Image (cartoon, rainbow, N blue to C red):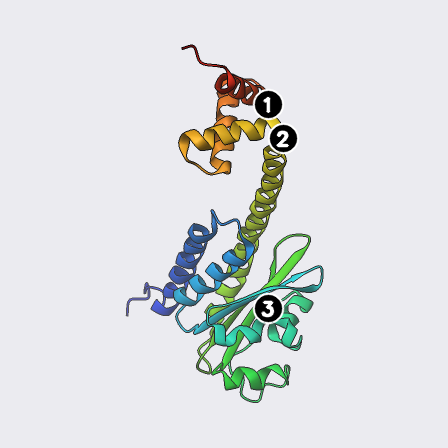
């Protein structure tokens, strides 16, 4: 008998699935700057990538209060939404700061209000893993099975790796969201500035573009000429206001 056998295919498949999931999550969230959009993408990609996982959900808390929920199937959204009660696997995972789950929910006594609702929706097994995002937001990613005893130790390992990776990606999304909001506020202030607002109006008229694109044109000119944005705006307004020679 040849003892140098290959690892069991199921284990290899689990590793490959996990690696593919993490790559797809990175690709799907790398440029997203909206937190709710990122959660929606995360649960959809996870559900589609993992064999044995019928649905995926995400529960988010901000400063201890419900801050968002996402579900790959809207029917199951209430299972992740803490407004319907905090007696859930997700909340237990968040409180204990460790993964919790049940391969078979039949007779499960830890979540007496949640388990019957899950059963009515066809959920037979669950894994919830805590996700650390930043100093304000934490959460849990929830994997649901439509059959009992299909969530294996491989799924548990994947959930742990998924939670760690998702925390990093979602932290980056939150950072981009904050920076986009700050940029928006700065742009609004600039557009309210008299001469810069006038220059933006000139560019919009000339190019038929929205205010944000016109402001980017001004910024690009200021960078290329190494002069302040206001000076570029003043030059442009002065040029278009100058009487033309007949």
Which image quarter: residue 228?
Answer: top right
State the quadrant of the C terminus: top left
In this rendered view, identify the residue nearer to me: 206 or 174. 206
Question: Do the numbered discs 2 and 3 sit on residues whose CB atoms are within 8 Å?
Answer: no
Q: Is residue 56 left or right of residue 49?
A: right
Point out the tag, 1 or 2, that comes first from the N-terminus.
2
Residue holding disc 3: 99
Reply above or below: 245 against 134. above
Residue holding disc 2: 193
Label 3 crowding class (10 Å Cα cut-off): few <14, some 14-19, many 20+? many
Q: Residue at x 62, y 34 (%)?
A: 192
State the quadrant of the N terminus: bottom left
Label 1 crowding class (10 Å Cα cut-off): few <14, some 14-19, many 20+? some
Q: Residue at x 55, y 50 (%)?
A: 173
Residue holding disc 1: 230
Cα distance in 3D space between marks 2 and 3 = 52 Å
Give x and y (percent) for residue 127: 54, 72
Reply above or below: 158 against 205. below
Residue occupying the far front of the picture: 246
Q: Residue at x 41, y 55 (%)?
A: 24
Question: Do the numbered discs 1 and 2 sit on residues whose CB atoms are within 8 Å?
Answer: yes
């Amino acid at each position: 008998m040849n003892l140098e056998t290959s690892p069991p295919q199921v284990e290899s498949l689990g590793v490959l699935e996990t690696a593919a999931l993490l790559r797809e999550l990175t690709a799907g969230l790398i440029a997203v700057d909206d937190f709710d959009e990122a959660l929606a993408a995360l649960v959809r990609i996870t559900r589609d990538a993992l064999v044995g996982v019928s649905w995926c959900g995400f529960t988010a808390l901000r400063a201890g209060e419900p801050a968002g929920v996402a579900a790959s199937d809207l029917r199951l959204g209430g299972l992740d939404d803490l407004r319907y009660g905090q007696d859930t696997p997700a909340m237990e995972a968040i409180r204990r700061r460790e993964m919790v789950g049940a391969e078979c929910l039949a007779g499960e006594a830890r979540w007496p209000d949640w388990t019957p609702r899950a059963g009515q929706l066809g959920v037979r097994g669950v894994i919830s893993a805590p996700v650390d995002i930043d100093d304000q937001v934490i959460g849990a990613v929830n994997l649901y099975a439509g059959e009992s005893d299909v969530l294996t130790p491989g799924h548990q390992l994947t959930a742990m790796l998924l939670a760690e990776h998702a925390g990093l990606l979602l932290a980056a999304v939150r950072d981009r969201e904050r920076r986009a909001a700050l940029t928006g506020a700065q742009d609004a202030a600039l557009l309210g500035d008299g001469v810069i607002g006038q220059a933006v109006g000139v560019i919009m008229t000339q190019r038929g573009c929205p205010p944000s694109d016109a402001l980017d044109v001004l910024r690009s000119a200021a960078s290329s000429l190494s002069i302040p944005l206001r000076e570029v705006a003043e030059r442009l307004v002065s040029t278009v206001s100058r009487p033309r020679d007949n």
